[in-house]
Image (cartoon, rainbow, N blue to C red):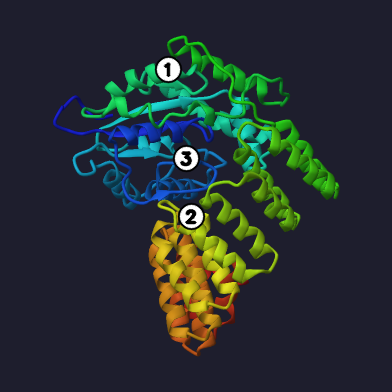
């Protein structure tokens, strides 16, 4: 970590497992004056935002991919390159004289990379009961409870090792609200100068804490997770703990079982009753809507939106998803446009609006929107390559090739091979074999494991010049 030089403004890194309050803590620090560098991830599973710099998420994802891991799987060892180091150190620089704020659960899975940073930085770690976090992941991502506990353990083992050394002070999301605020205030004093501690309390809303961890649960990983949780709590000042607001996670599991059995009417009836009687109907509506859309129950989703009447951003997104799934593209466009006129629209609403515009045969508008939002995407190349495919189908071949070039340029090296391979296919279709062969050579160098690149190289007239000896068939 950084030295004691008071003239240096340290970055603030918020560490924790998914669904353990990292967004809550980061939001409070942002309210106090810390600054997220660049565009932020904005998804609908967190009403106030995740406060994650898209560039930091991309960087952690890149390092994990290079290391053979992912956000759900910690690698056995962490590898990175000089380009990743440069980007990491750039992200940690102060923003307009304020401390930069970085938060992404992936950071714990590749912590050796982040901890090696040259700029000074301070840490704060979040702790939440493992069952509460796992149930939240089950509700939002349909993740089996045991997998959720395994993911919690993968992050929190690293957090525990850091906390044992005293490098990261911890805060318990499950603490009684006044105790939580007092702990947060005391920790903030040591993070950076000039933060407005009094402004943090306005961001904190204890009613947003769902999925309490006190109800009994069974899982092969539960005992191990509880043991780690106990050790984490022992490293914090004791505080009275509270239960989260009532959340009908067991009823949601019952509804999912009914849907899997094909009992749609029973599932919808139970969903209506549950939403109508719970303390936070929107928090229940969102995961249930996703479940219903998976079985094409679009009418049920539209009816539940009428029952709950969520915010325009949420209502427009849900209605747009349902209408698009029902093949009513023009109506989906209207609904999604209403979701995008709010101050901070969800990423899903804007990306889905592009899909709806394309389905409504408003191709140029769809393409332009997808290109415009690409810089804010966690993986910009995905937007650009989709726009390129759309341009190709519209016979705008030069635009398609240009967009693929931009997609390749926006991708980290280990993801470029497949994009180059697809661009080579298009170049070959246009009879531009020399350019296609050059892309194939680069694709084989960047992603030697991608079979399609080898297949195309073998099909080429100049295959002996493309394939290195190791790739040639015997």
- Which residue was labeled with disc 2? 347
Q: Residue at x 69, y 38 (%)?
A: 275
Q: Residue 470: in sight, yes or no?
A: no
Q: Residue 407: in sight, yes or no?
A: yes
Closer to viewer: mark 2 or mark 3: 2
Q: Which mark is residue 339?
A: none
- Residue 354 is situated, as x and y percent measured from the top left of the image, at 52, 67
Total marks shown come to: 3
In the image, taking residue 67 as reference, residue 301 lies left or right, namely: right
Q: Which mark is residue 106?
A: 3
Mark 3 nearby-residue class (10 Å; few <14, some 14–19, many ≥20): many
Mark 1 nearby-residue class (10 Å; few <14, some 14–19, many ≥20): few
Q: Which mark is first along the chain, 1 or 2? A: 1
- Residue 34 is situated, as x and y percent measured from the top left of the image, at 29, 36
Indicate the secondary structure of the residue bearing disc 3: helix
Hey, which quadrant is residue 439 in on the image? bottom left
In the image, taking residue 220 as reference, residue 192 lies left or right, namely: left
In the image, taking residue 320 as reference, residue 341 lies left or right, namely: left
Mark 2 nearby-residue class (10 Å; few <14, some 14–19, many ≥20): some
Considering the image in quadrants, where does the N terminus appear?
top left
- Residue 414 is situated, as x and y percent measured from the top left of the image, at 46, 58
Indicate the secondary structure of the residue bearing disc 2: helix
Height in image: 343 above or below 104? Answer: below
Closer to viewer: mark 2 or mark 1: 2
Q: Which mark is residue 164?
A: 1
Height in image: 113 above or below 264? Answer: above
Q: Residue at x 46, y 67 (%)?
A: 370
Q: Residue at x 80, y 43 (%)?
A: 269
Indicate the secondary structure of the residue bearing disc 1: helix
Q: Which mark is first along the chain, 3 or 1? A: 3
């Amino acid at each position: 970590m950084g030295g004691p030089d008071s003239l240096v403004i340290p970055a603030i890194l918020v560490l924790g497992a998914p669904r353990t309050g990292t967004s809550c803590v980061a939001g409070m620090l942002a309210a106090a004056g810390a600054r997220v560098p660049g565009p932020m991830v904005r998804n609908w599973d967190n009403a106030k935002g995740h406060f994650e710099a898209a560039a930091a998420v991309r960087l952690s994802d890149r390092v994990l991919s290079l290391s053979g891991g992912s956000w759900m799987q910690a690698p056995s060892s962490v590898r990175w390159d000089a380009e990743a180091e440069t980007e990491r150190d750039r992200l940690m620089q102060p923003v307009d004289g304020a401390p930069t704020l970085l938060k992404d659960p992936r950071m714990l899975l590749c912590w050796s990379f982040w901890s090696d940073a040259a700029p000074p930085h301070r840490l704060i770690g979040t702790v939440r009961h493992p069952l509460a976090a796992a149930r939240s992941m089950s509700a939002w991502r349909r993740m089996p409870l045991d997998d959720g506990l395994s993911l919690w353990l993968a992050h929190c083992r690293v957090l525990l090792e850091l906390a044992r050394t005293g490098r990261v002070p911890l805060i318990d999301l499950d603490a009684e609200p006044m105790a939580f605020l007092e702990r947060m205030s005391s920790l903030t004093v040591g993070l950076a100068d000039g933060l407005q501690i009094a402004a943090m309390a306005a961001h904190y809303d204890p009613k947003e804490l769902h999925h309490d961890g006190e109800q009994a649960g069974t899982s092969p990983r539960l005992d191990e997770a509880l043991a780690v949780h106990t050790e984490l709590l022992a490293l914090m000042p004791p505080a009275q703990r509270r239960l989260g607001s009532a959340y009908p996670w067991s009823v949601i599991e019952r509804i999912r079982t009914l849907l899997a059995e094909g009992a749609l009417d029973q599932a919808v009836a139970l969903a209506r009753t549950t939403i109508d009687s719970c303390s936070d109907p929107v928090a229940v509506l969102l995961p249930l809507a996703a479940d219903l859309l998976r079985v094409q129950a679009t009418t049920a989703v539209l009816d539940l939106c009428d029952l709950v009447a969520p915010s325009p951003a949420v209502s427009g997104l849900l209605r747009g998803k349902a209408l698009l799934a029902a093949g009513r593209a023009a109506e989906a466009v209207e609904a999604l446009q209403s979701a995008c006129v709010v101050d901070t629209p969800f990423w899903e609403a804007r990306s889905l609006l592009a899909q709806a515009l394309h389905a409504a045969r408003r191709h140029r508008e769809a393409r332009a929107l997808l290109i415009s939002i690409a810089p804010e995407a966690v993986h910009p190349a995905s937007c650009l390559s989709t726009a390129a495919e759309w341009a190709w189908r519209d016979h705008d071949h030069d635009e398609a090739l240009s967009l693929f070039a931009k997609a390749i340029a926006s991708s980290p090296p280990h993801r470029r091979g497949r994009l180059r391979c697809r661009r080579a296919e298009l170049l070959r279709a246009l009879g531009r074999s020399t350019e296609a062969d050059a892309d194939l050579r680069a694709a084989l160098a960047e992603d030697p494991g991608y079979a399609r690149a080898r297949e195309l190289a073998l099909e080429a007239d100049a295959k002996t010049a493309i394939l290195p000896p190791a790739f040639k068939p015997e």
